[in-house]
Image (spheres, rainbow, N blue to C red):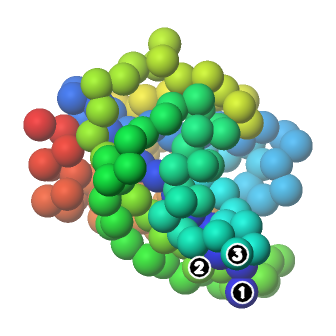
Amino acid sequence: MVRLACVLLVDRRGRVLLQERDEHAAVDPEKWGLVGGHVEDGEDYEPAAYRELEEETGVVLPPGALRFWREVTRSRPDLDDATFRIWCAGTYLDDADIVVGEGRQIVFVDPARIGGLDLADLAEAVLPEFLGSADYRALRG
């Protein structure tokens, strides 16, 4: 089973930080997805979420800033089964604060635009639920 940790950052305008994957991505190339990635051997999910956020965006959050949101198991014919643990946090950051460490771009996206994006499998599965949740409403202020 593949283990992955993902992060949903929400800015004070309610925009969600998403990554546009480039053509070199092994999974869901050229699609929009959540920031995050593989949990390394011997690593727990939560530290992996902080590490992946920093590696992909340059954003360093203090311990305790992320709150666990959901665990999702996905199965696809072309991949091993994968368990994703997703964390979320509110932020005062904006696009200028993000350093793209992986993918084509990583930007805050207005929820009204998300439906028009070519979403990766996981993003398509979880973003509608997240955007309709009390967690999302609390994070956007």
Q: Are marks 3 and 1 in contact (CB under 8 Å)?
A: no
**Number of marks in the rendered image:** 3
Tag shown at residue 94: none
- Determine the CA span between mark 1 and mark 2: 7 Å
Is residue 39 visible to the viewer in this orientation of the structure?
Answer: yes
Q: Position of residue 93 (x, y in %)?
A: 36, 23
Q: Quadrant of residue 84?
A: bottom right
Is residue 119 visible to the viewer in this orientation of the structure?
Answer: no
Q: Are marks 1 and 2 in contact (CB under 8 Å)?
A: yes
Q: Position of residue 54 (x, y in %)?
A: 58, 39
Kindly identify the amino acid type of the residue bearing the numbered disc 1: Met
Kindly identify the amino acid type of the residue bearing the numbered disc 3: Gly
Dot 3 or dot 1: first in sequence order is 1
Kindly identify the amino acid type of the residue bearing the numbered disc 2: Thr
Tag shown at residue 42: 3
The kind of secondary structure element at disc 3 is loop
Q: Position of residue 28 (x, y in %)?
A: 73, 55
Q: Position of residue 73 (x, y in %)?
A: 55, 82
Q: Residue at x 60, y 49 (%)?
A: 51
Tell me the residue that label 2 is attached to: 83
Tell me the residue that label 1 is attached to: 1
Where 37 sits versus 117, above or below?
below
- Determine the CA span between mark 3 and mark 1: 14 Å
The N terminus sits in image quarter? bottom right
Dot 1 or dot 2: first in sequence order is 1
- Determine the CA span between mark 3 and mark 2: 16 Å
Q: Are marks 3 and 2 in contact (CB under 8 Å)?
A: no
Closer to the eye: label 3 or 1: 3
